[in-house]
Image (cartoon, rainbow, N blue to C red):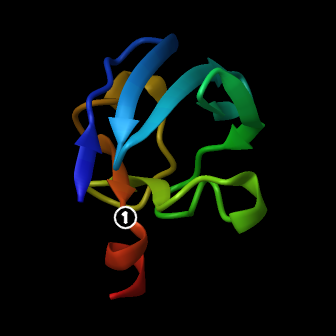
């Protein structure tokens, strides 16, 4: 399992290799919560995904993303907010094999 490095800022875009996939993650804090757009190889495959504690972000195989992304609150059971990114709220990537275990 991989922890994706994030900063505690309201808007950021991260390019990261996830098990051989060239992924772009755009994370934005709004008054309604934290949201993510996910891109693979310069193509957005999912946009406006609500970031909730311990919930899968991709979910659907037909999007072509291998594995899964999810946020976890390392202190309690709150949904993530920008000010705790990289600290209390961690973004994890798990391979398909790790998700099956």
Q: Residue at x 69, y 66 (%)?
A: 61
User: How many numbered tags mark residues here?
Assistant: 1
- Kindly tell me whether residue 91 is visible in this rendering: yes
Name the one closer to the observer, 17 or 54.
17
Mark 1: secondary structure: loop
52 w.r.t. 60: above or below:
above
Give the left or right position of residue 17, taking residue 25 as reference.
left
Residue 92 in percent (x, y) is at 34, 51
Residue under the image location 71 percent in, 42 percent down:
49
Which quadrant holds the C terminus? bottom left
Q: Residue furthest bottom?
A: 101
Residue 60 makes an appearance in the image: no
Residue drawn where x is 64% and y is 55% of the image = 58
Q: Quadrant of residue 83?
A: top left
The residue at which mark 1 appears reads as 95
Image position of 4 (left or right of 87): right
Examine the rendered structure and indicate whether residue 88 appears above or below residue 29: below
Quadrant location of the N terminus? bottom left
Relative vertical location of residue 79 with respect to residue 81 in this rendering, above or below: below
């Amino acid at each position: 399992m991989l922890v994706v490095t994030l900063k505690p800022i309201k808007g950021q875009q991260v390019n990261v290799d996830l098990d051989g996939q060239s992924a772009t993650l755009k994370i934005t804090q709004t008054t309604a919560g934290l949201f993510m757009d996910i891109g693979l190889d310069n193509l957005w495959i999912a946009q406006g995904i609500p970031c909730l504690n311990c919930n899968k972000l991709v979910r659907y195989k037909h999007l072509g993303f291998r594995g899964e992304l999810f946020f976890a609150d390392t202190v309690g059971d709150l949904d993530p907010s920008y000010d705790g990114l990289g600290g209390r709220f961690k973004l994890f990537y798990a391979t398909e094999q790790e998700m099956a275990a």
